[in-house]
Amino acid sequence: MFILPFALLTLTFFILPAIATVWMSFTDLDVKMKPNFIGLENYIRIFQDYSLGEILQNTIVYAVASLGFVLLLSLIIAISTQYFMKGKTVATGYRVLWLIPSLFPSVVFAIFWKYIFDPTENGFLNKIGMHLGAVDEPVSWITRYAMPIVILGTVVGSVSSNVILLSSSINSIPEDLYKAARVDGAGEKSIILKIILPTLRWPLMYITITTLIGFVSSYFFIMLLTDGGPMHDSTTLALYSYQQAFQLKYYGYGAAISMFVVVIALALTLVLLRLFDFDALVQPSRIEE
Amino acid sequence: MSKKILKLLVVHTYMAMLTVPILFMIVWYFMTATFNSYTGSFSLDNFAFMFGPIESMGIKLPAIWPIVLNTLVYSFTIVMIEVLISVPAAYAFSRLDFKGKRNAMKFLFIMRSFPGVTLIIATFFILVKMNLVDTYLGIILVAITGSLPGHVYIMKGFFDEVPWDLEWAAMTDGCSRFRAFRKVILPAVKPGIGAIAIFSFLGAYGEWFLFKLLIFSDTRLIIGGYIAKLITEENVIVDYGLISALGLFYTLPVILFYIFSQKIFMKVNIGGSKGV
Amino acid sequence: MIQLKGVVKEYGNAKNKEVTRAVDGIDLEINQGEFIALLGPSGCGKTTTLMMIAGLLKATKGEILFDGKVVNQMEPKDRNIGMVFQSYALYPHLKVIDNIAFPLREKKVPKAEAYEKAKNIAKKLQIENLLNRKPAQLSGGQQQRVAMARALVKEPQILLLDEPMSNLDARLKLDLRDEIRKLQREIGVTTIIVTHDQEEALAISDRVAVLDAGKIQQYDTPYNLYHKPKNLFIANFLGTPPMNIVEGHVEEQDGRQVFAAEGVRYMLPQNREVAKEHIGCRVAIGLRPNDIRICESTENTIPVRIELVEQLGAEQLIKAKPLAGDHIIRIVAENEMKLKAGETVSIRILENKFHLFNLERNGINILS
């Protein structure tokens, strides 16, 4: 059977963990490794957690702001390169340049930002700033602007895949449509608003949901860059669950928090499933045996 | 016509304003690797790590080559296993009828957009129970399960594109279903296999998180995990010259690899338009 | 000989459990060496039928027999068929010669022999100079020839052609059509072609099965299909410009039968009267545009006003309306007749060239 290996792997490392996560969220599993069933206590604790408000707020700010900037940037780049400079070498050049950040291994990418915003005089911004006389002494950028820096890094890293997606959609618009619009007296503004943007409705919706899921649930980048600090200034829900589980060894509590992330992601996925023509995805075999 | 030039000028200005600072920073960053930070002159001192264990600011760094070897072994194993598993699975999802296909497909979709990392706490315990913590087998299994759904989905897109006519022709020309898969369908999806091989290589090559979590022995580290360890360990004052030299050493193969395989990249349909 | 007995194909919809019938009980007999066509509008089930003969789809009900043996459960690869697809379906990764030799290699024919045979068939199809190219480097017509060669190389018992010429331009189509016919005669392989092009079907085949809504409407020689249509569907479907259909009824008048419709009265000739049971029923008269003459107003003619005159080149097409009616009647007239829109003329129906269909009985032809 073609899918047996796939099914087996999925079962052990996806379904099983999913069930285990639910189960763990109802226990007090910690470093002693002796789980006791404690019912809803973990969940009650979440709502009493004094840092929860801040973390939730961080999560929302992080996800929504990153998404907004990613969409805006991807749109600008895709439309510029695929419409205004269509077919020109320089367009490919821009697209390739934007691809570089996403090719970086994530550790290197994180160090890059660390270097840019390093608090000592060795950091890029401080060096430049001091050279130009804009700042007198090294600024601890990360301490001061943790969240904006995290968002900046995330946005730069995730633009390119979306640009590729949007570009191929813009590319599928027949050239005649632009010509017809121009003959009908449309300016660039209305071509973008009335022809290109409507075409991008589906890809944009897709990007919105998948990137939201990504931003809500992943914490690798933040972990490397700021590790949620200073204090909880750049801690998101997903990172918090990781910290509770693996740094403080409150595995049960960590699992309970990650259940929240799971629920959000699941809800978003279901929205995605509803929006998409799922039936077109499942085609029957056209050979009968 | 001059209006057109003006328009292009505006667009270029926009693009340049967005692009150039980032490009500049990246170049500068890697430049630090090739300069001595004290004298400011060109030097390759920072690449000393390539020639043996070195000491930097009081921390001993192990030799790099065994770690490079680990990285390659780890990455290529993942590529192989992933291709071997995802290609047949994608074929089944795309072209075969089997019981529960609809639900399996729905499940694949959920899995794909589902953050596997949220389940990492439980996965960790399952590995503990299976005695697979701190082994390559364990980390490979976890890594593959994480990236498999996406790759199966991409691969399915490639299989969907193969016209049924081709398979029909093979069947009437004397092939069984399986033989048609091998002789006709597989050659037709070669670019797809290339694409997922590249994706899984890049994924595996850039991995660090799972190594931080599941591997404790330094002898089993790969480059990503090694650098992550350097920068996340407390109280390490980072020598950017050294770190960016390491980063360059780590990134360069990927960039070169990318340049050679760029065509395959562009063919991948990530699934944005409706009903893809 | 190929036989289809009561073949039914149903598709289930996984989502709402609805069942649709693509093929609804087909009976068909094809003799050894015969060339037949499955003709019909898209969605009529003709390709599905072909796929079942090929074994790529399985019949829901009914039997398919090759030489008296039921083959329903036989794998496509064991049926000894050659097939040409609409898209030609050449294997893109193989060179032309490898494409042609592929079926033989799958039959475990030794390599040298397989390539020898492949070369021979390529010569017959005049593509021996293309053997080392990849399919992507060929024109549509060349690809079509390669596909034919690949289908014929294993000397199949049956040749199946699925819209093989629909992607070619008109001139090439005509040439290839003749060539396929000639080749088929020469080899004597039983051939089934699926097409929606009636001209192609009528020109190329010995017999044509016209399908609609999953059923065979008529299975007959091209001549009979055109001149003796079994029912209104066939009459309407075949022929360009299409047959004029005027709805009315047959009534008796002074011992003679008269077809009467809005603005049309036509006394039927005595040798072509209908059975009593049809009198008073809703009946349609079918008139080919070529079977109507423009004439002086005499007995049993119909006065019409010309609405439009179209040049067809060799002749002209007149669109006219009966003086007291509102339906268009198309008439093909010689170029010599000088006719203008707005003119009133009379038309005469050729006595043995009209058809009557009883609409209350599924449009069956009541004169043949």
Image: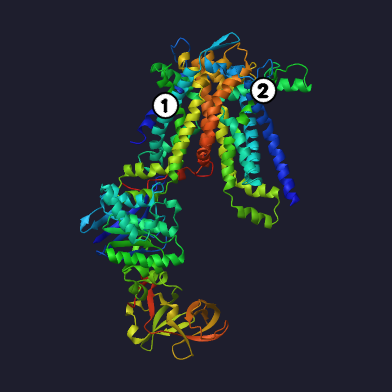
Across and down, in percent, residue A1 comes to 33, 36
- The three-letter amino acid code for the residue at tag 2 is Ile
**Chain name for mark 2:** A
As drawn, which residue projects farthest toward the left?
C68
Which colour assignment does the render follow? rainbow
> Could you tell me the amino acid type at mark 1?
Thr
Residue drawn at x 62%, y 33% is A67
In x, y percent, where is residue B134?
A: 43, 16
Q: Chain of mark 1?
A: B
The circle on residue B28 is none
B99 shown above or below C355:
above
Disc 2 and disc 1 in contact, CB within 8 angstroms: no
Instruction: Tell if the residue under mark 2 belongs to the same chain as the one under mark 1.
Output: no
Residue behind mark 2: A116
Camera-side residue of C204 and B9 = B9
The answer to whether any part of residue A28 appears in the image is no
Task: Looking at the picture, tell me which residue is in the foreground, C23 or C293.
Answer: C293
- Numbered disc total: 2
Location of residue A44 with respect to B87 vertically, above or below: above
> In screen coordinates, is A28 left or right of B243?
left
Res. A248 in view = yes
Label 1: which residue?
A: B77
- Depth check, front residue: B78 or C360: B78
